[in-house]
Image (tube, rainbow, N blue to C red):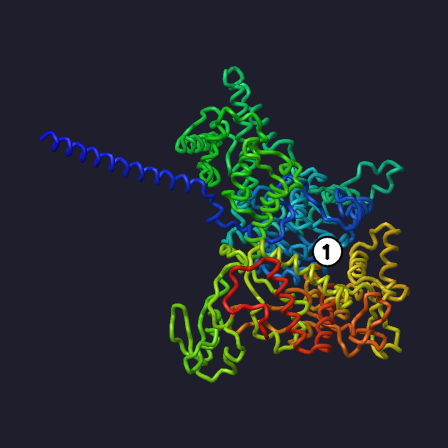
C-alpha cells in the first residue's frame, strides 16, 4: 500500500515538474522572441526615400564636409569667391525682374520635373533667362542633417517644381545656371537655402537678390514672405504647409499650390521692392565725396550687396569633441536650479551626458533628427526617474513629451520613437553605474549596432561612422580591454564589404532552372523565365510543366547539347558562390576578361555562359586580383602594353591618311589620353580662374597632342573626347549636365547603332544577359589602317618607337584595356587561329581555379572545355 502511495506521489510530482518545465520553456521562448523583436532595427522593414540616393555629399559621420574644388586651391575656400566678390564691388542691376502687369490669379498650369530629360530642358530654359525665382522645401524630422525634398523655380512665363528626391543624384546639372554671374536668382530669406543647396548637390548660388534683405534696407515693418504676398499681391498663404512632410509623393493639390506660390509671385515682389528702393532718398547726397552714391541705384546696390554676402556662406557640419556634448551642457544649464541642491545632481549630470551621447549616435546611425529620436524633456525625465523596465521607459518618455506639448499649448503628443522602441535594451546599459568613460560607451554601442554583426543596416549615411577618416578617431580606439575588439582597418573593411554587397550583389536568383525540351522530348538546356516567356508569347513552344516551368519547342532546334560533346548546358545550377558556397549574396564574374572576350569571333562567344559564374564578394576580390596580375603577364608575354601610352593629332598630316581630322597617331611624340582629357576638362571648366602658371602648364599638355600649335576652345572640346567610347561619351555628357558642342560629338544614332562585336551574351543553357559594353572597353582599333612601320602582328611594341596610325572612330576607346585586348586577340587569330583562342581561354580558367580553388562549380564545367 505504501509503495502504491509513493508511486502515485512520484508520478504526481513528475507531472507537476513536467508542467512547470513546459511553462518555463514557453515563457523563456516568449521572452526571447520579445527581446529579438525589440532588438530588431526598424530600418530593416521601413524604407526611407534617402536610402535610394546613390550620391551623398554630406553623410552623418564626424568628418568635415568637403566642398566643390574647382582647382588646386584649398577646399575650405568658396569655389566661386572671386565671382561673388566682383558682384559685391559692382552689382549688376541693369535687368528687369518683371515687365508688364501681374495676373494675381495663379493658373493651374505648371511643369513637374522628375526625370533627367525634363531637368536638362529646364537648364536650357534657365540659361536663356536673365532672372528667375527660387525656393526650396526641406525635410528635417526623419533626417539627421536634413535634405532638400523639392525646389520651386519660376520664370516670367512658367512655374517648375523639381522633384529633388527622384533627381537627387543628378541635380548638379543645375549647377552652371546657379553659378552664372550673369543670371540673377531671386530668393526670399536665402540664408538657409544657399547652404542647403551646397550640402545636398554642390550647387553654389552666384548673383542673388534676396527680397528679405530688400525689406531690411527699406525698413519694412515685417520681412516675412506672407507679409509681402499680402501687401503686394493680395494673396494669403498658410505657412502650416511649411511643416508638412515634403517627402510624400504625389502632393495633395493644396501642397502644390503652396509650393508654387512661394516662387510664383517672387519676381513681381522683387520688381516692386526695387522700384521702392530707387525712390529712396540718399541722405549722403549733400556730401561732395559721396557724389557716386546719390543716384537712384544707391539703395538697390545696398540690397544687392547684402544679398550677395549670403552667397559667400559655406555649409559646415557642427563637430564636437564628444558626441552630444553641447546638447548635454545646454540641458544641464537649463535645469541647474532644479537639481543643484539635490544629492543626486552629479548622477543626473552623468545620465544626461550618456543619453545625449546615445541620442547623437542613434540619430546619425538611423539618419533621424535628434528631436525625433529623443526629446530634451524626455532626456531630463529619464535622468530624473531612471526607469528600469521597458514599459516604464516608454511611459516616462511619453509622459514627458505630453507634458511639454501641453505646456506649449499644442495638441500633438509624441510617443517613443521607432529608434527607442528598436533599442530599448540599450537603456539598461546606459543606466549602469560602472560606465566611467563616454568614449568607451560610444564604441560599445557602435560595435553592437553597426559593427560587422550589428543589428542596424549599413547605408551611405552611417557607413562613415566606422571610417578611419572621422575626426572622432573611432578607428584608433579600443572598446574594452577584456574583448580586445578594435575599430581598426579590419572593421572599416568589413563595413565597406557589407555596403558593397548591398549595392552590387544580385538582387534576385540568377538561375531559375527552367527547362527547354526539343520537339522529340529531349532536354536541350536550362534557362530563365524570361526566355521561356519569349518562346511562349510567339507560339514557338507550349508549356508542359509549371513547377519548375518547362516548355517543349514546336520546331526543330538548330543544335543539340550532344553536338558540343559537353553536358554543362543540360545541368541545373545552384544560386551560390562557386568558390565557397556562399548563398546569401553573389555576383556574376567573367572568367575570361571582357577586354579580350569582346573581340572573339562571334560564334566563339555568342550564347556561351560556361565562363560566367557566380562568386561572393570575397572570392570576387581574390579572382579579380589574380586576373589583373595575369593581364600584366599577358602584356609582357606578347609585348602589348595594357594602356596606350601616347597619342598625337594628325589632322594636317595628309601624307598619313590623305583625309580628315578623324586620324590620330599613336607613338612617342604625344601625350597620355587620360592626361590629355584631364587637362582639357580643367581648362574648359576652370581656365579663367586658374593661376596663370598652372593654366600654361595644362595648355602645354594639350598642345603636345596638337603638334605644338595654339589651341582654341573647340580644340579643347575635341581633346576631351579623344579615345572615348560611346558609353564613356554618354557618361561625360551626363556628368557635365549638358550636351557638348554638337559638332564635336558623334550623333546619338551612331551611339545606339548595333554592332556585331557587341553582342548580348545570352546562353541557351543559362540565365545570363550580360551586356559587354558595360564591363570594360568595347571599342577597337581598326586593323585596316595600321601603318606599315608597325610590327608584323599589328601591335604597338613596348618601346613605342613604331608609329601606328589608327582611325579615331566612334568605337575607339584608348582609356582602358580595349586596344590591348584587341591586339592580343588579333595576334592569336593570325598566328594560331581559333585553337589559339581556345588555348587562351583555358589559361584564364586555370588562373581562376588557382585563385579561389572553387568547390561548387556546376557539373560539366571544365578547364579544358572546348567552345
Which part of the image, by quadrant, shows the N terminus? top left
Crowding near pointer 1: few (<14 within 10 Å), some, many (20+)?
Answer: some
* Residue under label 1: 176
Instruction: Give the vertical position of 431 relative to 536 (above or below).
Output: above
Give whichever of 721, 268 is nearer the camera: 721
Seen from this angle, which residue lies furthest right? 709
Rendered location of residue 803, percent (x, y): 85, 71
From the viewer's perspective, is 627 left or right of 371? right
Residue 124 in sight from this viewpoint: no
Rendered location of residue 614, percent (x, y): 54, 61
Q: SS of the residue at dot 1?
A: helix
At 55% across and 20% down in the image, what residue appears? 336
From the viewer's perspective, is 20 left or right of 467? left
Rendered location of residue 142, percent (x, y): 53, 44
Which part of the image, by quadrant, shows the C terminus? bottom right
Give whichever of 669, 808 is nearer the camera: 669
Rendered location of residue 567, percent (x, y): 50, 73
Q: How many marks?
A: 1
Give whichever of 796, 71 is nearer the camera: 796
Give whichever of 376, 577 is nearer the camera: 577
Q: Quadrant of residue 854?
A: bottom right
From the viewer's perspective, is 799 left or right of 350? right
Residue 183 in sight from this viewpoint: yes
Seen from this angle, which residue lies furthest left? 1
At 68% across and 69% down in the image, what residue appears? 596
Amino acid at each position: 500500500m505504501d509503495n502504491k502511495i509513493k508511486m502515485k506521489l512520484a508520478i504526481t510530482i513528475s507531472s507537476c515538474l513536467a508542467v512547470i518545465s513546459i511553462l518555463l520553456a514557453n515563457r523563456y521562448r516568449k521572452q526571447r522572441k520579445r527581446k529579438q523583436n525589440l532588438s530588431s532595427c526598424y530600418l530593416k522593414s521601413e524604407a526611407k526615400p534617402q536610402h535610394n540616393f546613390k550620391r551623398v555629399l554630406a553623410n552623418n559621420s564626424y568628418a568635415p564636409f568637403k566642398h566643390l574644388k574647382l582647382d588646386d586651391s584649398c577646399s575650405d575656400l568658396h569655389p566661386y569667391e572671386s565671382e561673388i566678390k566682383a558682384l559685391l564691388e559692382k552689382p549688376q542691376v541693369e535687368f528687369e525682374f518683371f515687365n508688364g502687369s501681374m495676373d494675381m490669379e495663379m493658373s493651374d498650369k505648371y511643369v513637374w520635373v522628375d526625370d533627367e530629360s525634363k531637368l536638362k530642358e529646364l537648364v536650357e530654359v534657365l540659361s536663356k533667362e536673365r532672372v528667375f525665382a527660387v525656393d526650396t522645401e526641406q525635410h528635417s524630422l526623419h533626417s539627421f542633417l536634413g535634405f532638400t525634398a523639392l525646389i520651386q523655380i519660376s520664370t516670367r512665363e512658367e512655374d517648375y517644381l523639381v522633384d529633388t528626391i527622384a533627381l537627387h543624384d543628378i541635380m548638379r546639372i543645375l549647377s552652371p545656371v546657379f553659378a552664372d554671374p550673369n543670371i540673377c536668382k531671386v530668393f526670399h530669406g536665402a540664408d538657409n537655402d544657399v547652404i542647403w543647396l551646397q550640402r545636398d548637390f554642390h550647387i553654389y548660388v552666384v548673383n542673388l537678390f534676396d527680397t528679405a534683405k530688400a525689406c531690411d534696407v527699406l525698413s519694412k515693418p515685417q520681412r516675412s514672405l506672407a507679409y509681402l504676398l499680402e501687401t503686394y499681391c493680395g494673396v494669403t498663404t498658410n505657412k502650416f504647409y511649411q511643416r508638412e512632410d515634403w517627402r510624400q509623393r504625389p502632393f495633395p493639390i493644396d501642397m502644390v499650390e503652396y509650393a508654387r506660390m512661394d516662387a510664383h509671385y517672387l519676381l513681381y515682389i522683387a520688381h516692386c521692392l526695387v522700384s521702392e528702393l530707387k525712390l529712396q532718398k540718399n541722405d549722403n547726397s549733400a556730401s561732395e565725396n559721396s557724389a557716386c552714391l546719390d543716384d537712384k541705384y544707391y539703395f538697390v546696390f545696398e540690397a544687392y550687396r547684402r544679398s550677395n554676402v549670403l552667397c559667400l556662406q559655406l555649409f559646415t557640419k557642427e563637430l564636437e569633441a564628444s558626441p552630444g556634448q553641447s546638447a548635454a551642457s545646454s540641458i544641464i544649464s537649463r535645469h541647474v536650479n532644479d537639481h543643484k541642491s539635490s544629492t543626486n545632481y552629479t548622477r543626473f549630470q552623468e545620465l544626461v551626458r550618456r543619453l545625449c551621447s546615445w541620442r547623437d549616435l542613434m540619430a546619425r546611425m538611423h539618419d533621424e533628427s535628434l528631436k525625433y529620436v529623443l526629446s530634451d524633456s524626455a532626456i531630463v525625465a529619464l535622468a530624473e526617474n531612471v526607469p528600469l523596465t521597458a514599459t516604464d521607459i516608454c511611459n516616462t518618455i511619453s509622459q514627458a513629451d505630453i507634458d511639454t506639448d501641453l505646456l506649449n499649448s499644442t495638441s500633438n503628443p509624441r510617443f517613443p520613437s521607432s529608434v527607442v522602441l528598436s533599442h530599448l535594451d540599450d537603456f539598461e546599459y546606459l543606466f549602469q553605474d560602472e560606465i566611467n568613460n563616454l568614449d568607451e560607451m560610444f564604441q560599445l554601442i557602435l560595435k553592437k549596432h553597426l559593427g560587422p554583426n550589428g543589428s542596424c543596416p549599413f547605408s551611405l549615411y552611417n557607413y562613415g561612422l566606422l571610417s578611419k577618416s572621422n575626426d572622432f578617431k573611432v578607428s584608433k580606439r579600443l572598446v574594452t580591454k577584456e574583448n580586445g575588439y578594435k575599430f581598426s582597418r579590419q572593421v572599416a573593411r568589413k563595413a565597406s564589404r557589407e555596403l558593397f554587397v548591398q549595392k552590387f550583389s544580385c538582387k534576385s536568383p540568377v538561375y531559375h532552372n527552367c527547362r527547354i525540351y526539343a520537339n522529340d522530348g529531349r532536354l536541350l538546356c536550362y534557362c530563365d523565365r524570361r526566355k521561356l516567356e519569349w518562346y511562349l508569347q510567339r507560339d514557338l513552344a507550349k508549356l508542359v510543366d509549371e513547377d519548375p516551368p518547362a516548355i517543349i519547342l514546336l520546331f526543330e532546334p538548330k543544335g543539340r547539347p550532344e553536338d558540343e560533346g559537353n553536358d554543362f548546358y543540360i545541368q541545373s545550377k545552384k544560386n551560390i558562390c562557386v568558390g565557397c558556397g556562399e548563398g546569401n549574396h553573389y555576383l556574376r564574374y567573367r572568367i575570361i576578361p571582357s577586354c579580350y572576350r569582346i573581340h572573339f569571333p562571334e560564334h566563339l562567344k555568342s550564347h556561351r555562359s560556361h565562363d560566367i559564374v557566380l562568386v561572393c564578394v570575397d572570392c570576387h576580390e581574390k579572382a579579380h586580383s589574380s586576373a589583373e596580375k595575369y593581364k600584366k603577364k599577358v602584356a609582357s608575354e606578347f609585348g602589348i602594353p595594357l594602356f596606350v601610352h601616347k597619342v598625337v593629332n594628325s589632322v594636317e598630316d595628309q601624307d598619313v591618311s590623305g583625309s580628315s581630322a578623324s586620324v590620330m597617331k599613336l607613338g612617342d611624340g604625344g601625350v597620355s589620353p587620360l592626361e590629355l582629357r584631364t587637362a582639357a576638362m580643367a581648362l574648359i571648366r576652370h581656365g579663367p580662374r586658374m593661376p596663370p602658371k598652372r593654366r600654361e602648364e595644362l595648355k602645354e599638355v594639350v598642345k603636345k597632342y596638337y603638334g605644338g600649335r595654339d589651341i582654341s576652345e573647340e580644340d579643347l572640346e575635341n581633346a576631351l573626347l579623344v579615345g572615348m567610347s560611346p558609353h564613356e561619351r554618354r557618361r561625360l555628357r551626363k556628368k557635365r549636365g549638358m550636351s557638348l558642342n554638337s559638332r564635336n560629338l558623334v550623333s546619338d544614332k551612331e551611339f545606339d547603332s548595333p554592332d556585331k562585336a557587341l553582342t548580348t551574351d545570352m546562353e541557351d543553357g543559362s540565365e545570363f544577359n550580360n551586356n559587354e559594353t558595360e564591363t570594360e572597353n568595347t571599342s577597337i582599333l581598326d586593323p585596316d589602317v595600321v601603318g606599315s612601320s608597325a610590327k608584323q602582328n599589328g601591335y604597338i611594341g613596348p618601346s613605342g618607337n613604331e608609329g601606328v596610325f589608327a582611325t579615331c572612330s566612334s568605337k575607339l576607346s584608348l582609356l582602358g584595356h580595349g586596344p590591348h585586348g584587341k591586339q592580343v586577340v588579333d595576334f592569336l587569330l593570325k598566328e594560331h587561329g581559333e585553337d589559339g583562342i581556345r588555348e587562351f581561354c583555358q589559361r584564364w580558367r586555370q588562373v581562376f581555379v588557382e585563385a579561389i580553388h572553387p568547390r561548387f562549380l556546376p557539373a560539366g564545367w571544365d578547364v579544358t572545355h572546348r567552345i
